[in-house]
Amino acid sequence: MPLDLVVGAQWGDEGKGRIVDRLAASADLVARWGGGDNAGHSVTVGDQVHRLHLIPSGILHPHTVCLLGAGMVIHPGRLVEEICQLQAAGVDVSPARLKLSAAAHVITPAHLALDAAQEAGRGAGQLGTTRRGIGPAYTDKAARRGLRAGAMRSPEEFSRQVTDSVSGAAAASPVDHASLLPEARAAGQEYAQHAEFLLPYLADTGRLVDEALSQGKLVLGEGAQGTLLDLDHGTYPYVTSSCTTTAGALAGLGIGAQHLRQVIGVVKCFQTRVGAGPFPTELHGDLADRLRGSGDRPWDEFGTTTGRPRRIGWLDAVLLRYAHRINGFTALALTKLDILSGLDPLCLCSEYRRQAGDEAAPEVSDLERASPVYLALPGWQSDLQPARAWEELPAPARDFVLEVERQAGVPIRLISVGPERQQLVERDPR
Ligand code: IMP
């Protein structure tokens, strides 16, 4: 009967994929609830690195069924591509194992063109979107004129709707993006082909989740992006257009709160962000370069979806406590602890400084003005990657984890010390 959720506690890229991969080993159903292929989850299994954008990371365990929930926006071509890529890598992605909600919304070429044109039009004020059409697709959904995946059940009609959306897009848009649009009829035909392919994957995913829960199966919700990118509670307007938090999971999957057992917040032991927006603990120069990595290794801090270098900063406990307030974490998974090896001291932002004349420190809604106060913690030199048990971590690494736990007010139960599946330390913090 339980539903467990994995939620990003920062600005995305926390390492949710590998935590889902661990927890999916005992799950029956693994479900994405929101966002689209703006997400990028990397999971390393043996010598293979799987980069997933739409399909839940749980697909890498052969016993799971994976769902793309009603709260998602789906680019059919990218989904077909991802299915084929995984199948070529030997992963079974048959319709028996992957279900696409008929209520999920479809990203059309018009959405892609509009996303790019809107970003270009913002000039220096760009949000830094992934240009995957996410915002425009959710805009159409909210305006009740979107195209849902269930429309693929009649490929011809679906093709006509896509053709019309492209041919009408230029006239309907306040920004000039005609040159970015494909030929409307060709786009419609392409989407009809994708519809034929995806038809067997369509399902009422809400019902499947409900049935699984009532049969006592374990459903694992796989979050995308992170709390600070949430449309309502993130650093608006520098956010994505979906609900990335616990509440969004229930809405996006179509299930009640009574099933919820655990909400696992995933926190990287430093802070990163792609795209524009406030970032109080941001670092520049050598230290940022050192934490980011060169880009040669799959886990270096470059966007999985866009390849952009991520902005880097120290871990911010004020934002972590805020993420806990929004999501109600029952436990945390702390990722990439091994990356901190060799740095001394390590900084952790515990609060924001009160500004002269202010009664209180800046709120999360006012991050531009936030000036971090840091705790300086001793670092360690040894490589953490061989550690598999709490006692095998050097004392300063354990102290760092304990301080994060104390600052967050949530137990840390999982710690990742390397990119491989087994490079995780499980801990019972009683
Ligand atoms: P959009 O979701 O493409 O509209 O982008 C809006 C903002 O969210 C931009 O700052 C993106 O960089 C950011 N964003 C979207 N998806 C992800 C993700 O999976 N990881 C990190 N940042 C993301």
Image (spheres, helix red, strand yellow):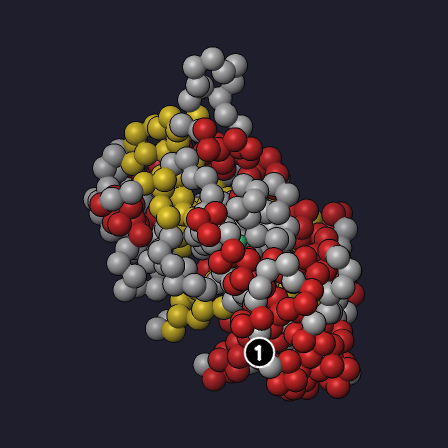
**Residue 180 can be seen, yes or no:** yes
For the point 45% across and 28% down, which residue is it? 369
Task: Identify the residue at horizontal 73%, vertical 84% (top origin).
Answer: 155
Asked if residue 55 can be seen in this view, the reply is no
SS at mark 1 in the image: loop
**Which residue is depicted at the point 43% across and 39% down?**
279
Residue occupied by mark 1: 182
Displayed quadrant of residue 194: bottom right
Q: Compared to 404, does 305 lie above or below?
A: below
Total number of numbered discs in the rendering: 1
Front residue of 35/350: it is 35
Determine whether 315 is above or below 307 in the image. above
Residue type, mark 1 in image:
Pro
Query: Residue 215 placed where, x, y %?
Result: 76, 63
Find residue 304 and report its image quarter: bottom left
Residue at (37% x, 33% y) in the render: 348
The location of residue 354, given as percent across then percent down, is 45, 19
Q: Name the one closer to the observer, 86 or 355.
A: 355
Task: Return the x and y of residue 394 as percentages of the image width and height.
Answer: 28, 42
On the rendered structure, is 117 left or right of 214?
left
